[in-house]
Image (cartoon, rainbow, N blue to C red):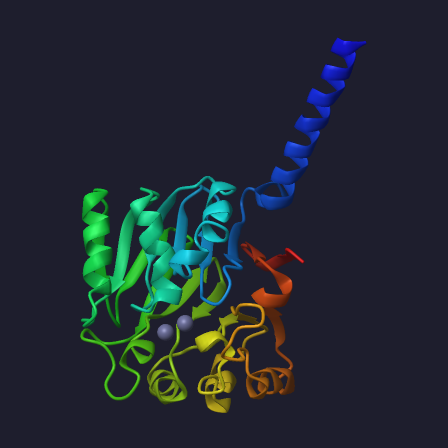
Amino acid sequence: MRSKKKLFYFLWVVAVIIATLAAKTYPEKIASENLAVTFVDIGQGDATFFETPSGTTVLVDGGEADEYEKGLLPFLSSHGAKVDIAIVSHYHSDHEGGIYESLLDGKIEKLILPDYPDTDGTRKGLERAAKRGGCEIEYVSKGDTIKVSEDFSLKVLHPEKGGAEGKNFHNNSSLVIMASCYDTEILLTGDIESRVESEIFAGEDIECDILKVAHHGSSSSSSKGFLTAADPTYAVISAGKGNSYGHPHYETLEKLENDDIRVYRTDTDGDITFEIAKDGIKNIHTER
Ligand SMILES: [Zn+2]
Ligand SMILES: [Zn+2]
């Protein structure tokens, strides 16, 4: 009886572990020939994770350092734990903090940084952490394309080398990236404001399928002109539950709603995964 009880307990523990892993890991739900992009719920910040059919992974931003242990780390652990390419959109802690921690943990193969200077040593800290781990560093600016695979590339639309001009230097110097996954376009906008949005859509084709809404849904971004030019089917807002900034602002939500754009939010939906096939978006999984 005792050994039967032990066996039953052991099987129960195994079942619980399998159920937990299945709940946290999406790849078995993603067809092997498709690409997955997940907007990770890491509280008030940004983290976007791409996984190609061959298993190559790209992480754009990583949230705050103090959210790493309970946010980004468990996510990465349930997705193979390695990041082939990590990109920092700009040197603000709610974007670079988790990347810094991942570098210290030796999880990143290659680091891509925006080519503008900062004054508080954040860029130097990232560079030092990367070098210590033997991680390659590349700097990008407008006009560069990061070719990840035959079917997946990232084109940098902004800023010029040296960063943006004018007020709110860091936010407006965010890398703006058009990710092309097969024929599906995903526009990542960091924390740019309306002024920079106008500069970008005046010179670039920004039409996309999924828009990662700028600056956590702040009303100082997502101008009418920008949304019209981007014309997305889906918008994703990354914001922390009950954050002190009031993100996303209701003005932004109203504009998205008026344009009939389907909105997903990490604060209410948790992790949001789009499964992308050769002929377009196949499935959308949300954690909640
Ligand atoms: Zn931010
Ligand atoms: Zn910022």
Residue 188, x across and y down, in percent: 42, 69
Specify whether residue 85 is in view.
no
Point out residue 40 in the picture as x, y percentages from the top left corner: 51, 58
Tell me which corner region of the image, top left, top right, bottom left or bottom right, holds residue 20: top right
In the rendered image, residue 74, in percent from the top left (x then y), is placed at 50, 46
Left or right placement of residue 72 versus residue 119 in this view: right
The residue positioned 30% from the left and 48% from the top of the image is: 103
Q: Residue at x 64, y 55 (%)?
A: 287
The answer, for residue 132, to whether it is visible in the render is yes
On the image, which quarter does residue 270 sit in? bottom right
Tell me which corner region of the image, top left, top right, bottom left or bottom right, holds residue 272.
bottom right
Query: In the image, what residue occupies the spot 24% across and 69% down?
Result: 141
Front residue of this view, candidates 96 and 202: 96
Q: Describe residue 282's horizontal placement relative to residue 189 as left or right.
A: right
Q: Quadrant of the N terminus?
A: top right
Q: Ligand 2 falls in which quarter?
A: bottom left
Residue 85 in the figure: left or right of residue 250: left
Residue lying at 47% horizontally and 57% vertically, measured from the top left: 182
Q: Position of residue 31 (x, y in %)?
A: 59, 44
Q: Is residue 256 above or below residue 13?
A: below
Asked if residue 154 is positioned above or below residue 8 in the image, the reply reads below
Q: Quadrant of the C terminus?
A: bottom right
